[in-house]
Amino acid sequence: MSSKDQEQDKLLVHEDEKHLLLDHSYDNIQELNHPLPNWWNTIFIVSTVYAIGYFVYYQYMGGPSLREEFKKDFTEVAAVRDHFKKQNEIFNPDHYQAIVADDGLNKGKAVYELNCMPCHMERGAGDVGPNLTDDHWIVAKGTPDTVYQVVFNGSEENGMPAWGQLIPKDEVYQAVAYVMSLKNTFVKGKEPQGEKIEE
Amino acid sequence: MSASLDGKPRNGRLESFTYDDGIVKLFVIATLIWGVVALFLGVTIAFQMADWHVNLGLPWTTFGRLRPLHTNAAIFAFCGNAIFAGIYYSHQRLLKARLFSDTLSKIHFWGWQLIIVSAALTLPFGITTGKEYAELEWPIDIAITLIWVVFAVNFFGTIIRRRERHIYVAIWFYIATILTVAVLHIVNSLEIPVTLTKSYSLYAGVQDALVQWWYGHNAVAFFLTTPFLGLMYYFVPKAANRPVYSYRLSIIHFWSLVFIYIWAGPHHLLYTTLPEWAQTLGMVFSVMLWMPSWGGMINGLMTLRGVWDKVRTEPSLRFMAAALTFYGMSTFEGPLLSIKSVNAIAHFTDWIPGHVHSGTIGWNYMLIAGILFFLVPKLWNTELYSKKLAHQQFWFVTIGLVLYIISMWVAGITQSMMWRAMDDAGNLIYPNFVETVIKITPMYWIRAIGGTLVLTSFIMMMYNFWKTIKNGKKEAPVVYEAYALDSSSIEHDASAHRKLEGWPMIFSVLSLIAILVGSAIEIIPSLMADKYVVKIDAIKPYTALELYGRDVYIKEGCYLCHSQTVRPMAHEAVRYGKVSNAAEFVYDHPFQWGSKRTGPDLARVGGKYPNMWHYKHFFDPREVTAGSLMPQYRWLFDSKIDYKTLPKKLEVMRKLGVPYSQEEIDNSVADARAQAKMIAEDLAQSGVPMKIAEMDVVALIAYIQRIGVDYGSIPEEE
């Protein structure tokens, strides 16, 4: 190995940098002493000034905190959501008919399979959520408007989400159409719960 | 045989000595072995994200357990051994002195391998502290400390025996590394043992998060950056046979880098409940860090001036040049990701693993490869087996890495946009989290393929070195000669910094001070927790069963896919619920905020679903959520709750300041059994047999149903 070390070709130093070569040598490593690139200096200084300015503005000069910015945003969003909820939590029979007429059942089945099946199982047999195919009802009363109410507003303390704020309004109507089609189909599954509703 | 080293007239004694290259060889071999293990684990978990079947249904092969093994193997085993190999090789030569003690070198080597083996024997079995990149449990933490001290003694002992007065810039970086890693490791690992394999972090909640990410960020800084910069300063000029570009730049970028880096940890905690002044410090220091980082890149790349033709033909230079380029890229991306508004989009998404890997593969793997192509033929006294294979390897790793980075950019930004998309009614357009997961699954496949290319490239390198080493020739160790340190090398009219380079111990103290300033300013206020976090009375400690369930959560590594912190953003408040409050976490030893949302945030999951939903979900997530990639946790259904550990667990928690009464501790087993029975009775209504009350899954459900409930019950203040 030593022979190789000695053979090592001479350090490559270009003509235009010879004057910058320092006489430091560590295991034959030498150092030039180029000045710091201007752009490097400039960006370093600018980023430092920006950092100080940013910190001072947000910490000492009343720049809005993340929480304050959030409160402002969320108040707006909450107002829109509230307005929408008030407008839509009332069941609209005409709209329901229009949705049913527009292939509501099949569209409702798709909505159901994506969102409801985890708890109500295939064809409404029930599991985590109640059986939707019997003639017993816990919250709803087996009519489109009462089913709409539960689906839209949920029964959150018992584990039924409020879908009105989770999926588009029309999908809620479509899901209702599908749930109505399950009624009294008596699919074998979870035992009936709630009260029997005679029609 | 002897080699004279330089020709200056000296008045000291002429001494002859040899270098210990045997230890370097050992570390090189360990680097290669652990490297392939780390990459194999990485590829495995990448495929698990693309297809959940790859979890194999076994506890010890599931994502949450293998991910910590992958990160620990990559950082501490692969990079760690490479660092030790490179430092031990260059340190001796830069100081013209054999390593301080051959015995310490051996203890260092074997001790470190033993630590790695014990990591491999604990992490897959769920023995973990639950703190990212610091998962190893307390006995291993102690072993790490001891071996690190051995390394430090060996390193500084060599400095004391040096025959070169001034220390070269590579050694500055080594010094900063050794001191800072020691401080980080010890402070972050303070924990109280419960059993031999279980401990609780001394810190809780916000405080724990701050210490953890001060550590985590600086593990990147002082384990994956500064030692590698040091190695770069030795091996790049050596391999290029060129003088380093700028000594002045070395000085400025070294000091600014070590001083600034340590402050940047809170950029991992933007938008959390960490006080905003600390978040802002984390952000602005990250921005300032850009140029100091690039100082290293410039000094490396400009050193290659005039030898770019050799970069094309010499594997070592080629890998080094690529490493410096990727280093430049990722140290630009880092500050960018620290800017609050960019972080709001990127945090918790796949953009972050993409960023991490442009550093770890682009910078660390590439530089290690460059160093090894330089070192292996030298150490084994032969020629490289195949340059062609090395160039092919280069293209494999480069293409693999580019696939990785681009797929994760696309996945991260796509998913983030889907999370925040709202319609005119203020409803989320993708309320089902899983829709956003299914959308990016193709990207997970591309990433896994990219990873496979990287793994293949590494195997090519192993083969190349295997053939090279087999050709190696034994030669008697070279005897070198140099003068003992004497007054002739004192430069009386040198600049202040040059003088400092002649006083390594003072240099070390100054660099220690440089890293302690930022650490103290950020961390000490959080230790005065009373003022730092305003407590809320409604937030109560976990019950015994919930605490046990929380340990199951930690054991299974759920925190690696789920966060537990709702950020102050309108779309998060709509999706998850109330924005998190610092007071919620005061009993969380350790905190579990997580850093990645592969699954949804769980901070408000308590009470969201019935028990039965979770029961089915843990058995098979796809039964309740079609398209989920979450693994099955079937073993939790027949592993029994270890009730007898409960009193001890509560007692340790009480020591840590969680207000459990003596009565609660004494009754913990009975209380836990009663709560488990209640949950089992609820499940029984859906036909689950009552014996489930004995099983881990019930404890986990108890915990999940408790998360966020106390805070959620407080009426929203206006």
Image: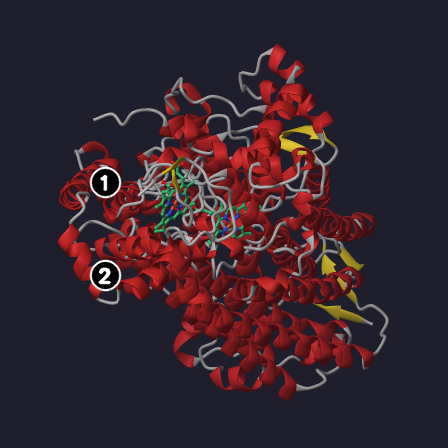
Q: Are marks 1 and 2 on the same chain?
A: yes
| Residue B191 locus on image (x, y percent) | 62, 30
Write the residue at 57% across / 62% down.
Answer: B52
Nearer to us in this view, B707 or B343: B707
Write the residue at 59% across / 62% down.
Answer: B45
Q: Which residue is mark 1?
A: A70
Mark 1 or mark 2, earlier in chain: 1
Distance between the Cα atoms at labels 1 and 2? 40 Å
Q: Secondary structure at mark 2?
A: helix
| Residue B131 locus on image (x, y percent) | 56, 41
| Residue B72 locus on image (x, y percent) | 63, 53
Examine the rendering and report whether any part of residue B189 can be seen.
Answer: no
- Mark 2 is surrounded, within 10 Å at the Cα level, by few (under 14), some (14 to 19) or many (20 or more) other residues, namely some
The answer to whether residue B621 is above or below residue B591 is: below
The quarter of the rendered structure image containing the C terminus of chain B is: top left
- Mark 1 is surrounded, within 10 Å at the Cα level, by few (under 14), some (14 to 19) or many (20 or more) other residues, namely some
The answer to whether residue B209 is above or below residue B161 is: above
When asked about the image quadrant of residue B54, the answer is bottom right
Hey, which residue is sitting farthest bottom in the picture? B388
Chain containing mark 2: A
| Residue B691 locus on image (x, y percent) | 69, 36
| Closer to viewer: mark 1 or mark 2 | 2
Q: Secondary structure at mark 1?
A: helix
Instruction: Tell me the tag on residue A100.
Output: 2
Chain containing mark 1: A
Nearer to us in this view, B187 or B344: B344
Amino acid type indicated by mark 1: Phe
Examine the rendering and report whether any part of residue A89 can be seen.
Answer: yes
